[in-house]
Every structure is written in C-alpha cells, then in structure tokens.
C-alpha cells in the first residue's frame, strides 16, 4: 500500500515515545515530583517552561485489575467513546482516517477561565508492540497522539488558541493464570498503564492557572477513563 505522508513521522514518534514511557521515573532524568497518588495510581510532573509558558511534562503509572492493554488502548483510541470519558472535551471531529489504526483529530476543549479556549489538531496511532523483553510474555499496546499541522485547519485563526500536545499511553497486560488450570477470567488479568503527556498551551496562560488546572484535571482524567474501561468491559469477553 502507498505510504501516507505522515507515516515516517508517526513511526519515528511512536518508537521514541514508547522507549521513553518504558523508562522508570528514575531513568527519566531528574526533577520529577510525585504530585498525585490514588491507590495504585502515581502521577509525576516536571516543572518546565518554554518561552515563559508552562509545558510541565507529566508521567502517570497505574495498575488496574480486570482489564487488558488492548482494551485500554481500544477505548482510548476509538472516537466513538471519547465524549463518555473526556470531560474537558467540547467538540471532536475526525479530520482524516489515515488507516484503521491511525486517525487525525480536531478537538476543542472547554474554556478554562481566565484563559481563552483551546483546540488541538493531532494524529492518533494505535499499535500492538512485541514484548521484546520476555518473548512469551503478553504483548504491549500503545496509543500515541501528536499535534500536527493541517492545511485545512490553520492554527489560531478562530477564537481558539491552538495547543501542541504529545501523549503516549503504554499498556502492559499481566496474566496470573489460575492454579487449577480453569479458564482465565478477569480476576486473572491486570494492566500496567503508563500515561505520558506534554501539553504546550500555545498562547500565554498564567503559570499558576495552568499548574492548578493540570493538578486538578490529570488525576481526574486517568481515574475517570480507567473506571470507564472497567465498566465497559466487565460483562464482555476479554480482549487480549
Ligand atoms: C488553559 C488550559 C490550556 C490547556 C487545556 C487542555 C487542553 C487539552 C488537553 C488534553 C488534550 C488531549 C489529551 S489526550 O490524552 O490526547 C486524550 C484525547 O482527548 C489530554 C489532554 C489538556 C488540557 C489541560 C486542561 C488539562 C487537562 C488535563 C487532562 C485532561 C483534560 N484536560
């Protein structure tokens, strides 16, 4: 099949983001602060500014029982579920279906006073990754979202300020087979989720406002999303 113009960028970005997501917090360089904890979920951020704008990288690790990496990535990637779990979303459009595992999105997010409303244009790619560490271990799944230009949607022409984001959701399924050889149920699976994101707010927004928003929104987002996947999958066959 003819390669899409974005394919080389997508492939390079996915490999780079997954490599970083797999690194432990200790290996990710210094300056990570644990800023939220809820049961198994630990959320770290690093204070970083670009041109005086807060772009604090975020890294969250979470272990959720009863769901698999394929399921987590499926519900994160598919546009048809997004309004159910993404509370700050005002509008979402699929601008282009690049392939069955790669979409281009336009999203506008609810305005957060006193900043102006934000929008994002990004490609989103979902991929199963060979578990190169442990050959017979379960595979890993990932979704990478990365801002891109779209000639038909130039940045900052309307009322919305264009943000620039790079997001990586990396999922590693764990299976604990029952001792008595009975079939695997949801009690025997869990998923280690690593969520990394860097959001450049695009236009000036007060550092104090941005940091307060990230501190409030990110833990809420990950908790709500994982709870959503648990509820959507509990009565369905396991998707490995
Ligand atoms: C003055 C505020 C400027 C930034 C507002 C803003 C915009 C987009 C985003 C965002 C866009 C995409 C993603 S995703 O992971 O790719 C999923 C698909 O939606 C995630 C987060 C974040 C925020 C910041 C609110 C903060 C915030 C944090 C977690 C959730 C919602 N809002």
Image (spheres, rainbow, N blue to C red):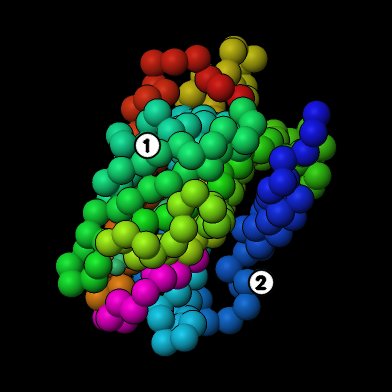
Q: Residue at x 49, y 49 (%)?
A: 152
Range shown magenta: 198-208
Query: In which quarter of the view is residue 219 placed?
Result: bottom left
Q: Is residue 104 visible?
A: yes
Residue nearer the viewer, 103 or 129: 103
Q: Residue at x 28, y 81 (%)?
A: 206
Residue 208 position in % (x across, y down)? 27, 80
Q: Quadrant of the C terminus?
A: top right
Task: Give the residue at mark 2.
Answer: 27
Residue 234 position in % (x across, y down)? 39, 22
Label 1 CA crowd tier, 10 Å (few <14, some 14–19, many 20+): some
Residue 132 position in % (x across, y down)? 81, 44
Q: Is residue 63 visible?
A: no
Q: Residue at x 34, y 34 (%)?
A: 228
Question: Residues under labels 2 and 1: Cα distance?
Answer: 32 Å
Label 2 CA crowd tier, 10 Å (few <14, some 14–19, many 20+): few
Residue nearer the viewer, 103 or 144: 103
Q: From this view, report whether residue 145 is shown above or below residue 58.
A: above
Mark 2 vs mark 1: give the one in front: 1
Query: In which quarter of the view is residue 97 placed?
Result: top right
Task: Give the residue at mark 1.
Answer: 82
Q: Is mark 1 within 8 Å of ligand 1?
A: yes
Residue 26 position in % (x across, y down)? 61, 72
Q: Is residue 232 magenta?
A: no
Q: Residue at x 43, y 33 (%)?
A: 79
Q: Secondary structure at mark 1?
A: helix
Looking at the image, tell me whether mark 2 or mark 1 is earlier in sequence order. Answer: 2
Q: From this view, report whether residue 204 is shown above or below residue 92.
A: below
Image-based side of 127 in relation to 44, left or right: right
């Amino acid at each position: 099949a003819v390669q899409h113009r974005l394919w080389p960028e997508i492939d390079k970005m996915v490999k780079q983001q997954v490599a970083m997501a797999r690194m432990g917090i200790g290996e990710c360089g210094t300056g990570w602060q644990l800023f939220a904890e809820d049961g198994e979920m630990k959320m770290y951020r690093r204070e970083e500014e670009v041109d005086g704008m807060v772009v604090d990288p975020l890294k969250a690790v979470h272990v959720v029982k009863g769901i698999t990496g394929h399921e987590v990535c499926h519900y994160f990637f598919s546009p048809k579920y997004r309004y159910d779990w993404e509370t700050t979303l005002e509008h979402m459009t699929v601008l282009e279906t690049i392939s069955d595992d790669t979409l281009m999105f336009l999203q506008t997010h609810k305005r957060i006073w006193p900043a102006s409303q934000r929008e994002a244009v990004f490609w989103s790619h979902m991929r199963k990754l060979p578990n190169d560490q442990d050959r017979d271990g379960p595979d890993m799944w990932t979704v990478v979202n990365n801002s891109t230009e779209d000639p038909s949607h130039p940045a900052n022409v309307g009322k919305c300020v264009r943000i620039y984001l790079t997001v990586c959701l990396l999922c590693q399924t764990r299976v604990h087979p029952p001792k008595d050889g009975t079939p695997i149920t949801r009690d025997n699976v869990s998923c280690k989720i690593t969520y990394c994101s860097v959001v450049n707010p695009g236009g000036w927004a007060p550092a104090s406002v941005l940091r307060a928003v990230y501190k409030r929104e990110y833990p809420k987002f990950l908790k709500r999303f994982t709870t959503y996947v648990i509820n959507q999958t509990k009565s369905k066959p396991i998707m490995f």
